[in-house]
Image: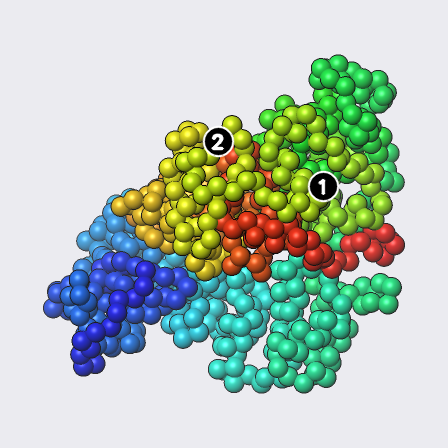
Amino acid sequence: MAPPRESDRGPEIALSGVVERILWLDEETHFTIAELVAENNEKTIILGNMTGLQCGETVDLLGFWERHPSHGPQLRVKSFSSRLPSSVHGIRKYLGSGLIKGIGKTYADKIVAKFGVRTFEIISNMSGRLREVEGIGPGRAKSIKAAWEEQKALREVMVFLQTYGVTNSICLRIVKAYGEEAKKVVTAEPYRVCREVEGVGFKTADKIARNLGLPTAGPQRVDAGILHTLEELEGEGHSAFPDEGLLEKSTALLEVDRAVVQDRMRRLIEENAVGILDYRGVRLVQLRPQENAEKSIAVSIRRFIGGDSGLPAIQAEKAIEWAQGRAGFTFSEAQATGVLMALKNKVSVLTGGPGTGKTTILKALCDILSAKRTRMMLGAPTGRAAKRMSEATGVPAATIHRLLKFDHAAGGFTANADNPLAADFVIVDESSMLDTKLAAALLRAVPSTAHLLLVGDVNQLPSVGAGNVLGDLIESGTAAVTRLDTVFRQGARSGIVTVAHGILHADTTPPTPVEDPTKLDFSDDIHFVKVEDPETCVAMVTRICCDILPKALRLDPLRDIQVLAPMHKGTGGIQAYNQALQVRLRGPDAKPGRISPGDKVIQTRNNYDKLVYNGDFGVVLGQNEAGTLLVDFDGTRVELERGEQSDLQLAYAVSIHKSQGSEFPAVVVPLLRQHSIMLARNLIYTAVTRGRKQVILVGDPTAYAMAVRNASDSRRITGLLPRLKDNL
């Protein structure tokens, strides 16, 4: 929602009152529209950038009146300060807003009825007396007191940080990390915050530090800049980077003398704050967690290869004949080899595109192992991939996170080297999605006697997290690799499979473009609808998702159809598609750009407490008075509190990267020349192979050709390949 246009500005005035309702909040800009009950009990609309404004607060405002053509007079706020309310109404409103965990509207009424204007004094200094209120026992009284103290700390941090543009969700994380010490830590060690609190970037910490007067070329700032540069490179997928390149990038970021940065980089290496790997004349610098993860992967692979097999005696060739009879057809030579490789080698890789028979091999292998009563564990990085794997093999499969069982209290996975998985054979599908850290955790938990089979398509986009685990393992030669490149009869009949393999072979010809989507023949499974400009593309995608596909194929727009777009921002970006689809599908219930009950969402960060992970799709079922959302993630219902909701994004449209490991009955992919900076062969290949029954490309055929032609190898730099290949 855009801020109302300023007009008829009046003189600057001061106004105080209680925030009755938050009508609109933009988390990025902090622009807020709220309803205020002034001290004379008149209701007023206030608007402006008010970081941390909360329902129920008493605020002192400085601003000026302006008149909105539809809503009349309202106060545009220039500055504000917050204080705890002193009236019974204000206290009741503040406590009933859900800010203090353990107090909803019902308990707010009871507490204020008991203690009146002394309520805040009681909670702060005599919280034991809360037990005098019916329904509040010692446990609830204690949690209310703890939540009250956290809220006080949060308010202090928010007031301090509001001039630096820090979002509410980041303030919550800072307070969660440091509690009552939050303001002290931020003031004394701002760069520590960007290292220790996820979501706080170097630029935010730098702005705070420079306003506090910390020296531009001081060790604290330069060290933080070098580490931040490594983190940025990790975000681009590199788990290591050459020292010369790191020096150049860090110097450009910090804008200080190169010699100063070089000296601090040398100190960081000497103090073991970063890892260093000398490989063929190049010094690779790594963050310690990446170094440890890569070393762990290399050690695990050597452990598997050097260990005995825990499999029962299996005559592999006869077992394959038996599996062929069970399947009802003869396997190709490559398929039979894939099964043989997995049975005879402790570590093997199976790679190939759609329609090449990966599922046939998995099913045959699982049938053989089941017949031999072998303990199998099947896993995949995402819930959807695990479900698909289970359906294909008839063997239960789970996400890797669930296989490893994260223990929040211990701060790690329950399954590890000391408590390995109870398995003789571990199969991981969609292995191209494995980043370095997750792969390390998984391999540590696999017992030495077990066989490991990694299944994946190396032509897809690499993992969202840093590393190139599948590619490095294949290139190192340490695993037995089976490559499938023949498309079989069932796949050959599929337009999706044909187009996908055409993309890999640099065929720039798209499916025959049409301009009228009502003319599509849905006996074919892939189509191209031609449009030229972003606005028309957004309208066409919305029409296809909301009208054409639901009617033609009886698909649910919310659960069966997924828009996959190359870019986030701009007229033809993910945000534009999300807003258009949200408004169209939700109708009058839509809150454009905001998440509310009924919306389709995606989790963007691992939440080990709630067992939901980056890339999980869900639908919001409801919201309680404290603002907690109830979300259905593929059948698992999870409650997410306010501080956890910043990890959710609308998911009517998502990036192609975020779709990895998932398949959908139908995908709609906008492709425009405006996306050119992102268009690449592996991107369009990944998008097309996400559709199970239907793929509709919408846009400009020349953009399709641009993507297919762009096979530039944006290779990730890692230390894993030399560690595997040269035993470093």
Look at the numbered disc 2 and give the secondary structure of its residue.
Answer: loop
Which is more N-terminal, label 2 or label 1? 1
Tell me the CA gap for discs 1 and 2. 49 Å
Front residue (pair 266, 177): 266
Q: Position of residue 410 (x, y in %)?
A: 61, 49
Using the rendered image of the protein, determine whether residue 143 is visible from the camera's viewpoint: no
The quadrant of the image that shows the N terminus is bottom left
Direction from residue 137 to residue 508 in the image, left or right: right
The amino acid on which the numbered mark 2 sits, given as a three-letter code, is: Asp
For disc 2, the marked residue is: 521
Q: How is the image coloured?
A: rainbow
For label 2, the crowd category at 10 Å Cα-Cα, with few meaning under 14, some 14 to 19 and many 20 or more, is few
Image quarter of residue 48: bottom left
Using the rendered image of the protein, determine whether residue 323 is visible from the camera's viewpoint: yes
In the image, is residue 668 above or below residue 100? above
The quadrant of the image that shows the C terminus is bottom right
Q: Which mark is residue 445?
A: 1
Front residue (pair 624, 545): 545
